[in-house]
Image: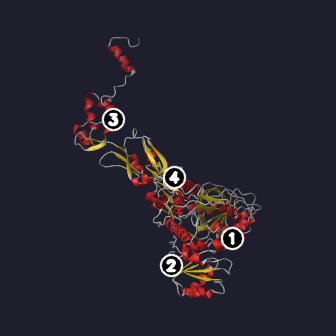
């Protein structure tokens, strides 16, 4: 139980669900438990009195939260008031009598503090472009003109009857490029033309031109064609409907009319450009986030990527697969989510719960499905603990690892039958979690995805989950930090609590952990890979030619292999716990070559000797009278410059080429020898 002196106000909802006071007391140690039967109606005085006595209150009801918040506001309550749904998630279920530990866990987890969200402000002045090809666009534009500053753009229009009044601009053109968001759209239009005011039975347009530019705040697309933006339904300010679907068009008109003013859009992710492993020296490394972003909010920006907060739709796939922690999710931050997860699972166990199944779900789809199962079916099983996240695609490997370490016997992620976002990042992390769980003795298939819109199918999928093995002693660590350090912490704790903690686990492709293999015979210790490594997993030694590697830092971005001129580096995804604990290890080390002039160490002895052997007396620059030049190669950079300057020779000056002989030269030579030049 988090916090101090917290009071739990639980209601049986007119005796429609049982309350296990003993389980609540075991799980919520230190918390005062108050019960009621009809708290939101006939017993509101209990809640009112409690507001005057307690500074921290958890109410076990979300349906009537608006009523309780209104009562608290009327009394100027300044304490900590939170709400937990224990009815649809536990009390309204066939196994409700066994759901006491779950209710305790849900009440305790609800009190875990979440940091406030940050926002990006989008401003719209109501300048709208209605894009279509027929009378539907005209109708939409005319109906919205009362609320918005409308322009209608018709793409390849047919015979359109001219409007009686020219109060709304009607133009012809086809949008060929579109960028931007609510309040800042920029469009490129080809075949652009204005209609003639003398148009009689149909609109007649003047001479068209390409490359016209238009800016607007809102784009209303009833063209029936392909979306103007990737994942267009997720682009703020871009509204699209099939012109043949009258209900969809009506919904679009209603939504568009309200898009005037300032709008706070959550800043879903944070980016630390210094940690990004996208590129170094024009060599491409990690592209995981670029491949998964559905909206195009992520773009290359030199050595790192850039993320547009205005375009980002909050799926969180970038943060879930980022190997370095450069991109982290912020709604809420991952460490805050894991602390809530910790409270949920530890309280469940302390209250007497066994074999917990963690059900991760979103609010829009998952909560509705859980509610439907509670109202019209058997409800969630008593051992299934639901935990809401903003988007299921934000869930990274650290969440799965922490859940298993904290004692969950299985993890299920609840998704839609037709996904809202690309699930490849989520399924990739599920594969990583299962690889770890299977190798460390937690059991096979411990993490999985349930894709359904049917509450009965959800119930069947949950019923099929077999009992799993939990850790020998569930972990109780407190998740701290974010990104890569948090991921390493959770995996380390998963290993520490494992039933069979083996030393190394092979991981699937693209896993964010692994080792590199270097062909030492081909490596020249040029150390280009050290300069390219964005996370300092590769390092050198200033005192002697050395290539060292620290495995727990490696993110498998591939920049070292892409940069290596000899192409002697290969990657292997794995987690080697012994290597993690061992720190740096030397991959290759050689003696330095000492300058023959000042004895300063420089370069690699074997490399210098190979160069000398290849050039000495075998190349014009180091042969004959120029043989002394070979000594320059055995000097450090300072002595080399001094010798070149003092002895006034250009090490790059080649012998003069012999003059080119012409026909005139040949004829002249024959004449000088007394020979007939024409014979």
First of labels 3, 4 by sequence position: 4
| Residue identified by numbered label 3 | 611
Please tell me which of labels 2 and 4 falls first in the chain. 2
Q: Which residue is mark 2?
A: 30
Quadrant location, the C terminus:
top left
Read off the residue under disc 4: 511
Contact check, label 2 and label 4, Cβ < 8 Å: no
Q: CA distance from mark 4 to mark 1?
A: 41 Å
Disc with the residue nearer the chain's start (1 vs 3): 1
Residue wearing tag 1: 94
Residues at marks 2 and 3, CA–CA distance in whole angstroms: 76 Å
Query: Is residue 253 in view?
Result: no
Label 2: how many residues lie within 10 Å, few (<14), some (14-19) or many (20+)? some
Most distant residue in the right direction? 201
SS assignment at label 1: loop
User: Are there few (<14), some (14-19), or many (20+) residues within 10 Å of tag 4?
Assistant: many
Earlier in the chain: of badge 1 and badge 2, it is: 2
User: How are the residues colored?
Assistant: secondary structure
Q: As drawn, is 114 to the left or to the right of 524? A: right
């Amino acid at each position: 139980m988090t916090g101090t002196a917290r009071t739990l106000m639980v209601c049986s909802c007119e005796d429609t669900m049982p309350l296990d006071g003993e389980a609540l007391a075991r799980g919520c140690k230190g918390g005062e438990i108050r019960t009621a039967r009809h708290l939101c109606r006939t017993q509101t005085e209990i809640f009112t009195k409690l507001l005057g006595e307690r500074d921290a209150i958890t109410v076990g009801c979300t349906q009537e939260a608006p009523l309780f918040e209104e009562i608290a506001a009327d009394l100027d309550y300044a304490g900590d008031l939170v709400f937990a749904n224990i009815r649809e998630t536990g009390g309204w279920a066939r196994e409700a009598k066994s759901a006491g530990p779950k209710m305790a866990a849900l009440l305790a987890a609800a009190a875990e503090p979440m940091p406030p969200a940050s926002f990006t402000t989008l401003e719209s002045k109501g300048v709208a472009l209605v894009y279509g090809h027929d009378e539907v666009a005209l109708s939409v534009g005319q109906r919205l003109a009362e609320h918005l500053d409308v322009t209608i753009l018709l793409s390849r229009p047919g015979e359109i009857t001219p409007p009686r009044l020219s109060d709304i601009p009607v133009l012809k053109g086809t949008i060929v490029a579109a960028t931007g968001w609510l309040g800042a759209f920029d469009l490129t239009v080809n075949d652009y033309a204005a209609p003639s005011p003398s148009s009689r039975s149909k609109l007649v347009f003047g001479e068209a031109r390409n490359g016209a530019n238009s800016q607007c705040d809102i784009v209303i697309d009833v063209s029936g064609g392909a979306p103007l933006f990737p994942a267009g339904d997720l682009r703020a300010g871009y509204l699209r409907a099939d012109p043949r679907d009258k209900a969809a068009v009506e919904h679009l008109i209603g939504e568009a009319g309200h898009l005037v003013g300032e709008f706070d859009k959550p800043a879903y992710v944070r980016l630390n450009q210094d940690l990004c492993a996208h590129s170094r020296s024009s060599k491409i490394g990690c592209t995981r986030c670029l491949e998964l972003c559905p909206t195009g909010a992520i773009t290359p920006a030199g050595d790192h990527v850039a993320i547009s907060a205005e375009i980002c739709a909050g799926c969180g796939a970038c943060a879930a697969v980022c190997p370095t922690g450069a991109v982290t999710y912020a709604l809420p931050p991952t460490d805050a989510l894991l602390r809530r997860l910790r409270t949920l699972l530890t309280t469940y166990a302390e209250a007497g719960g066994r074999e917990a199944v963690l059900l991760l779900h979103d609010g829009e789809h998952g909560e509705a499905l859980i509610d439907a199962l509670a109202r019209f079916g058997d409800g969630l099983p008593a051992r299934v603990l639901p935990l809401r996240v903003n988007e299921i695609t934000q869930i990274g490997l650290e969440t799965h690892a922490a859940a298993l370490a904290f004692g969950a016997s299985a993890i299920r992620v609840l998704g839609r039958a037709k996904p809202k976002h690309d699930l490849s990042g989520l399924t990739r992390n599920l594969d990583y979690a299962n690889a770890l769980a299977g190798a460390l003795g937690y059991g096979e298939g411990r993490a999985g995805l349930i894709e359904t819109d049917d509450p009965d199918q959800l119930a069947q999928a949950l019923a099929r989950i077999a009992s799993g093995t939990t850790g020998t002693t569930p972990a109780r660590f407190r998740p701290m930090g974010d990104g890569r350090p948090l991921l390493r912490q959770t995996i380390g704790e998963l290993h520490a609590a494992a039933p069979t903690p083996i030393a190394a686990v092979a991981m699937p492709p693209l896993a964010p952990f692994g080792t590199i293999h270097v062909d030492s015979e081909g490596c020249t210790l040029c150390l280009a890979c050290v300069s390219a490594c964005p996370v300092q997993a590769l390092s050198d030694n200033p005192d002697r030619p050395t290539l060292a590697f620290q495995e727990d830092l490696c993110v498998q971005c591939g920049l070292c292999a892409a940069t290596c001129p000899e192409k002697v580096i290969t990657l292997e995804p794995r987690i080697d716990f012994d290597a993690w604990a061992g720190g740096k290890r030397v991959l290759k080390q050689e003696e330095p070559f000492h300058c023959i002039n000042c004895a300063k160490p420089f370069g690699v002895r074997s490399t210098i000797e190979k160069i000398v052997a290849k050039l000495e007396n075998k190349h014009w620059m180091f042969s004959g009278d120029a043989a002394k030049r070979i000594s320059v190669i055995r000097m450090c950079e300072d002595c080399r410059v001094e010798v070149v300057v003092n002895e006034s020779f250009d090490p790059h000056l080649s012998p003069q080429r012999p003059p080119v002989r012409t026909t005139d030269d040949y004829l002249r030579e024959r004449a000088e020898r007394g020979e007939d030049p024409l014979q």
